[in-house]
Amino acid sequence: MYLSHYTQGFRLLDISDPENIIELGWYDDHPPINFNPNSLWFFRRFKGRWFNGIYGVFPDPNRSNICYAGGYPGGFYIFDVTPPPYPPALDVTVSEDEHPLLLINYIERTNIDHFDIYKKSNSQGYQYLNSTQNLFYEDVTETVYNGGGQGHHWIWYYVTAVSVTSYESNASERVSIDVNGYANEQKRSAEKEKNKETEVFEYSLSDNYPNPFNPSTQINYSVKLAGVVTLKVYDMLGTEVATLVNERKDPGNYSITFNAFTLPSGIYVYKLTADNFAATKKLVLLK
């Protein structure tokens, strides 16, 4: 819905769920606003004169992302109401060549042109590194040392999605990797796998954390016997909205992150199925 107000500019609202109206974008024709009645800029008044704002918003019949509005004394406005893309989900691992490998999780690729990658090391702030159109990116400027590094050397990354109309999303979550400590981590992982062989596990499904969440939350679960495991998310009508796990798993403890940036706020159910075991729990998405 396009909403205009005589003194408060223009709003673009998603009203598909009337109980959860989301503001997608806005424009104020005169930025300064002050809620102090003694101020010259109280709301949109300046020296006794009120700014009239925007009125009469009309969508373009041929271009869904364009609408028009009148304004006094501002004249005639043309708005591009294309919403910015959602921020990607990001993870980092190590490539076969021992370089940091970024894994970008982005479902809605229709209007995305590329992803911008930003990087920070111990000695500097975040700086633009490169752009990619792929869902993975190998940072060949860094090497994950195989036991030769001294101390710790952390590298942080985040990415943004850039649409075909050059809108840039908010930043993804920051991820990091200790390039000098990777060899020690590999050693600890090998010892952990060795201990896992003699460890006894039970089927279990934990409460997600955080809960409520926005937009991502972590779900932990355990598998007793090797076999196919599924972990799915449903809305309150029983419609499946996401499949988080659907593969063979060995006995052990597991954790997965559920990113719900494409879903509306509400209560959802996640269900774990393995062998003859099944468990369900609720999670709450608040945007």
Image (cartoon, rainbow, N blue to C red):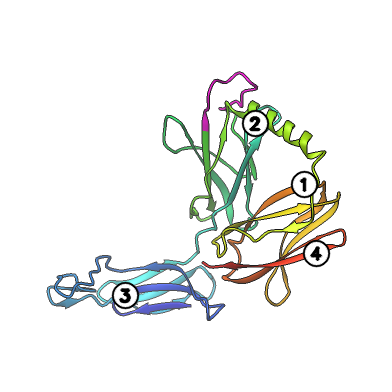
Mark 1 to mark 2: distance in Å? Answer: 19 Å
Disc 1/disc 3 C-alpha distance (Å): 56 Å
Q: Mark 2, mark 3: which one is toward the viewer? A: 2
SS at mark 1 in the image: strand
Magenta range is 141-154
Q: Earlier in the sequence, mark 2 or mark 4?
A: 2
Residue 196 percent across, percent down from the top left: 78, 39
Residue sitting at x 26%, y 78%: 52
Which is more N-terminal, label 3 or label 4? 3
Give the distance between the C-alpha atoms of the residues marked 4 and 3, in whole angstroms: 52 Å
* In-front residue for pair 271/261: 271
Task: Single out the residue that lies furthest toward the left.
Answer: 47
Q: Position of residue 74 (x, y in %)?
A: 27, 71
Residue 238, position in %: x, y? 73, 74
Would you say the magenta stretch is mainly helix, strand or loop? loop
Which type of secondary structure does the marked residue at label 2 adopt? helix
In the displayed structure image, the side of residue 275 where residue 272 appears, left or right: left
Q: Which residue is mark 2?
A: 185
Q: Was residue 223 drawn as part of the magenta stretch in this picture?
A: no
Q: What kind of residue is marked 3? A: Gln
Front tag of 1 and 2: 1
Q: Amino acid at mark 2?
A: Glu
**Tag 4 residue:** 278
Q: Which one is earlier in the sequence, the residue at label 2 or at label 3? A: 3
